[in-house]
Image (cartoon, rainbow, N blue to C red):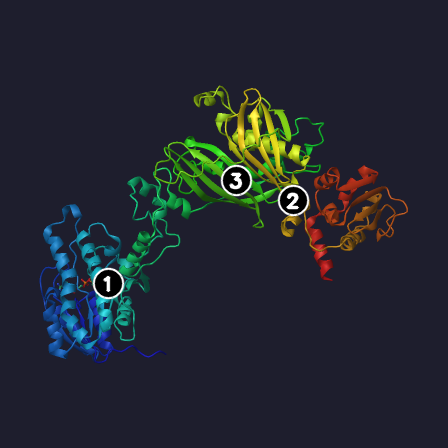
Amino acid sequence: MTEQLRFDNKVVIITGAGAGLGRSHALMFGARGAKVVVNDLGGDTAGGGKSSAAADKVVEEIKALGGEAVANYDSVEDGAKIVQTALDAFGTVDIVVNNAGILRDASFQKMSDADWDLILRVHLNGTKSVTQAAWPIMREKGYGRIVMTTSAAGIYGNFGQANYSAAKLGIYGLANTLAEEGRAKNILVNTIAPIAASRLTETVMPPELLANLKPEAVTPLVGWLAHESCEETKGLFEVGAGYIAKLRWERTQGHIFGSDRPFTPENVAQKWAKITDFTDSEHPAAVAETFGALSRAMSQKSLGGNEFIDLDVATREELVLESSYDERDLAIYALGVGAARDPMDDDERKFVYELGDFHALPTWGVMPQSNAMLEQAKDGGLKLPGMNYGFDRVLHGEQYTEVRGPLPKSAKLKHIFKFKHAYDKDPHAVVVFGVSTVDEHGDEIVYNEMTTFVKGAGGWGGERGPSADINTPPDRKPDAVIEEATDVNQTLLYRLSGDWNPLHADPAFAKAFGYDKPILHGLCTFGHVGRHVVKAMLGNDPRRFKSIKVRFAEPVFPGETLVTKMWKEADNRVIVETSVKERGKVVIKNAVVEFYDEIPVRKAKAAASDAAPVAAAEPGKVMPQDVFAVIADHVAGHPDLAAKVDTAFQFKLNNPESNWVLDLKTGSDAVREGIADKADCTIELDADLLHTVVTAPLADVQKLFFGGRMKVGGNVMASNKLTELSVIDPARYEEAMARRLAS
Ligand code: NAI
């Protein structure tokens, strides 16, 4: 058992110790060897009357237990007299428990000055008075323990207790400062907010609740806080019914507007969610920590901005959005930017037909992040960090898109939007955001830079930015020209890729913006231009395509003919300009497209999962013999299979080469390596696709076939019977494979 915490030779003053909590504390101290001053005015709960009986009775109780105690009948407002009693009887003071209290509850509306004053006098002034009289003695001896009594009403507020809660929180404020002033002199000050049955609470709480709220359940905390071995100071505790918990202040991370830049109530409103967000909150415990936050604010020099553009927020925050796409998105996009208009043309089918030698158009790289942004804007408008303007002000000025290699046929992506520049073209602004798009492996697959012209958002006195005309075409005939009409319904097709702006679909809407009819999306023209370069300069093989940078000069109307001129500047660099034939207007200018020297090879982990998107299972380092062993087990366990399937299969595997027989006709020696004497059906494919054939759904197997990755000879229809192998259940296959690999 731990040693009893004793108070031998310690002199303790407990105010209001004639009843309730104070009495309970006094008995505890008396029983543990303290010399106790039992103070009590002996009045009623509202502060009326006076009697020595209450204090005397408790003194007697302590003495009966063998303790030492004296009574004091003064009001706590006369703190010096109470301390004098301690000095006269015991010569010093070591501990003060400020506990005395009364109530004068009334709604604030009805509260009289008398009610207000009396409560503040007894609680706040009384606590101050007793403590101040004991303070020099404690300082002198370099020892003191002070326990203050506050209340939940003070901490949280409570109807009808304006006076009481003001006084009680005042006590906590007093305690916090005394804790600081007393620290160096070993005077420790703590505050409790008790809940207990007493005459103060008997009228406000139901009897069954009061029965469980014994003052004795509060006193042990007072005993510990008042003991010399306890080093706690400046603490605040809720205590009652056998429960003790500590409270502290909590502060949000807040928002720094900066001290050198004016800001408005509107700015505060905009940042309210952040100002009040307790995620990653702090728990300041001293004034210095407030100064710490302020000095952080002061040291942060504002980069400037105005009501539309806040450069401080823009540089500090980033936006992360997610999206995904698949082959269908790629095909719809390709059609939207005019690919494969002639279905008999072999060259562009690869962009729209997923079963062939399928490729993403490189300019698709701009779409996932752009779509993610548009999607997010659907609920509440544009949310780029620090940008407080809507789409109505924005014109897409320039676009740079760089793919890190051939784009995957499907991907789950994360887009990280980071502010790059804002140029002040007073009265307008030019804003540049960089967007890094990473795939599910964390590899960056595209980097975009979007330059927007923001009407009326300039004028904060910032840099004007570069104005040099770059990437202008040389003064010679272009090395290649592609002339191609857009379709009259081009925008209607393109918008299915994600940009729903009615400007591109609704004639009335377009009219309101000053156009005779819906205009082509800028990024639709961009897609056409990129495709023209792939066609003319890369022989329609998009895999070496690296980047494209364009400036949007004029809108294009659907049905107009685009003329894209290309000047080869170097092996890997082409200057591009696109105009509309019918109007002779340049629509895309200062454009440049760059190529890689060689087709970039994506990292193994990403490439592996991309190579076999149809595979239902990826059993790692499984060899054909493993797969066939599992099939052999299965066939052995299902003697009826042969009758059902009635087909002999010959597998010809490549990379590495091997031949396997699966004879479900004769049933003898059904699975073996080698060449069959007579096979109904020959199946040829890469060894690593074998597991797909036996585990994936029929549709995926057919996809391999139609995609040219699996060749079937002989009785083609018979190959469908492979599905009769119930090893096709991927879970069972995995299980069997795991068993086999383990053995
Ligand atoms: P109580 O009424 O049983 O005891 C308070 C004692 O203080 C009484 O004996 C009273 O005569 C004495 N007293 C009143 N005015 C005095 C003065 N001017 N000078 C000297 N003694 C005086 O009340 P209880 O419940 O034991 O309250 C003790 C303390 O705990 C009070 O400060 C009260 O505000 C606080 N408290 C109590 C809660 C509870 O649930 N009981 C809740 C929150 C706070």
Query: Which residue carries the number 2 mark?
Result: 597
User: Which quadrant holds the C terminus?
Assistant: bottom right
Q: Residues within 10 Å of mark 3 (few under 14, many from 20)?
A: many
Q: Where is residue 331 shown, x and y percent of the image?
A: 63, 34
Whichever of labels 3 and 2 marks the residue nearer the N terminus, that label is 3
Q: Residue at x 80, y 48 (%)?
A: 653
Note whether ligand 1 is within 8 Å of mark 1. Answer: no
In the image, 103 versus 687, the foreground residue is 687
User: Badges 3 and 1: C-beta atoms under 8 Å apart?
Assistant: no
Vertical comparison of 646 with 212: above or below: above
556 with respect to 734 (left or right): left
Q: Quadrant of ligand 1?
A: bottom left
Separation (CA) of disc 3 from disc 2:
27 Å
Note whether ligand 1 is within 8 Å of mark 3. Answer: no
Query: Which residue carries the number 1 mark?
Result: 176
Badge number at residue 369: 3
214 with respect to 741 (left or right): left
Vertical comparison of 614 with 219: above or below: above
Residue type at numbered disc 1: Asn
User: Badges 3 and 2: C-beta atoms under 8 Å apart?
Assistant: no
In which quarter of the view is residue 91 placed?
Answer: bottom left
SS category of the residue bearing label 1: helix
- Residue at the right extreme of this rendering: 677
Residue type at numbered disc 3: Gln
